[in-house]
Image (cartoon, rainbow, N blue to C red):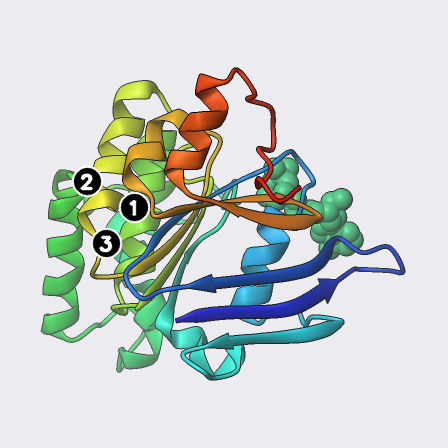
Amino acid sequence: MIELKNVNFGFDEELILENVNISINKGDLIGIIGPNGGGKTTLLKLIMGFLKPRSGKILLLKKEPEEMRHHIGYVPQNSRYDHDFPITVLELVLSPMAKESKWFGRYPAHLKEKACSLLEALGLIDFQNRCFGDLSGGLAQRALIARSLIDDPEILLLDEPTSNIDQKTREGIYEYIYSLKGEKTILMVTHDLNTIIENVEKIFCVEKEVSCLLPKQVCEHFALGLYHTPLRGSHD
Ligand SMILES: Nc1ncnc2c1ncn2[C@@H]1O[C@H](COP(=O)(O)OP(=O)(O)OP(=O)(O)O)[C@@H](O)[C@H]1O
Ligand SMILES: [Mg+2]
């Protein structure tokens, strides 16, 4: 589904990501960990085609990332939004579909139904007419997840979807993400390694280079008291 071969990337001479080789199967749930500035967000932006590799190849279903962008749902890190911007939760969820609305804000009934069912699934239906900017961090994050799913993406990229959120809300968000397993191919940047370890197919540790670990290998690291961030593949 997603293939990176010998990918190098840097904003200037210095490489931010070096010789990245990864392969992700359809329906996989991948956890991405690594230190601040390690290149996690950059990796997601390369997969979306917003950044171009200096060398190497990125293919999504054997196509160039730009061609596949409309198959990708994205929840950005620390989503910046204007708290005074007058948009309701329902409008926010529908906003990626603006191209389908005849007049701004008038969406076809089937899209409204879809948005409502996503809001229902994420426990937000009672907030649909609230101003998005008034929501607490956890509710806002759930609204952004609903928004990322409105166009039925095959691939879902989540960049720290639960940062700055209380434990209980965080668990609810993870449960929802796990419920999409198999149906979507999911890459999720997170610092909650021990929370997600049971539910992911692979863990990518991003610190300029990307090493791939199976949950079993991560548990062995824990058992041996070798935990450090990022965990490195046994080949290192
Ligand atoms: N637009 C940019 N121009 C120049 N350098 C950038 C740009 N965006 C990111 N960087 C640098 O690239 C490196 C990787 O950044 P990136 O945001 O991918 O890290 P990250 O792993 O997502 O970190 P965090 O855990 O803090 O989110 C950092 O050193 C960062 O300063
Ligand atoms: Mg980041």
Alpha carbons under labels 2 and 1: distance apart: 9 Å
The amino acid marked with disc number 2 is Phe
In terms of secondary structure, where does tag 3 sit?
A: helix
In terms of secondary structure, where does tag 2 sit?
A: helix
Q: Residue at horizontal 59%, vertical 50%?
A: 41
Q: Is residue 182 left or right of residue 2?
A: left
Total marks drawn? 3
Alpha carbons under labels 1 and 3: distance apart: 9 Å
Mark carried by residue 143: 1
Q: Disc 1 vs disc 3: which is toward the camera?
A: 1
The answer to whether marks 3 and 2 mark residues whose Cβ atoms lie closer than 8 Å is no
Mark carried by residue 90: 3
Tell me the quarter of the picture where residue 219 sits: top left
Q: Disc 2 vs disc 1: which is toward the camera?
A: 1
Q: Residue at horizontal 38%, vertical 37%?
A: 215
Picture coordinates of residue 154 (x, y %)?
30, 68
The answer to whether marks 1 and 3 mark residues whose Cβ atoms lie closer than 8 Å is no
Q: Which of the two residues, 194 or 98, is positioned nearer the viewer here?
A: 194
Q: Residues within 10 Å of mark 3 (few under 14, many from 20)?
A: many
The answer to whether marks 2 and 1 mark residues whose Cβ atoms lie closer than 8 Å is yes
Q: Residues within 10 Å of mark 1 (few under 14, many from 20)?
A: many
Earlier residue among tags 1 and 3: 3
Q: Which of the two residues, 99 or 2, is positioned nearer the viewer here?
A: 2
Q: Is residue 102 left or right of residue 36?
A: left
In terms of secondary structure, where does tag 1 sit?
A: helix
Earlier residue among tags 3 and 2: 3
Alpha carbons under labels 3 and 2: distance apart: 8 Å
Which residue does the numbered mark 2 point to in the structure image? 127
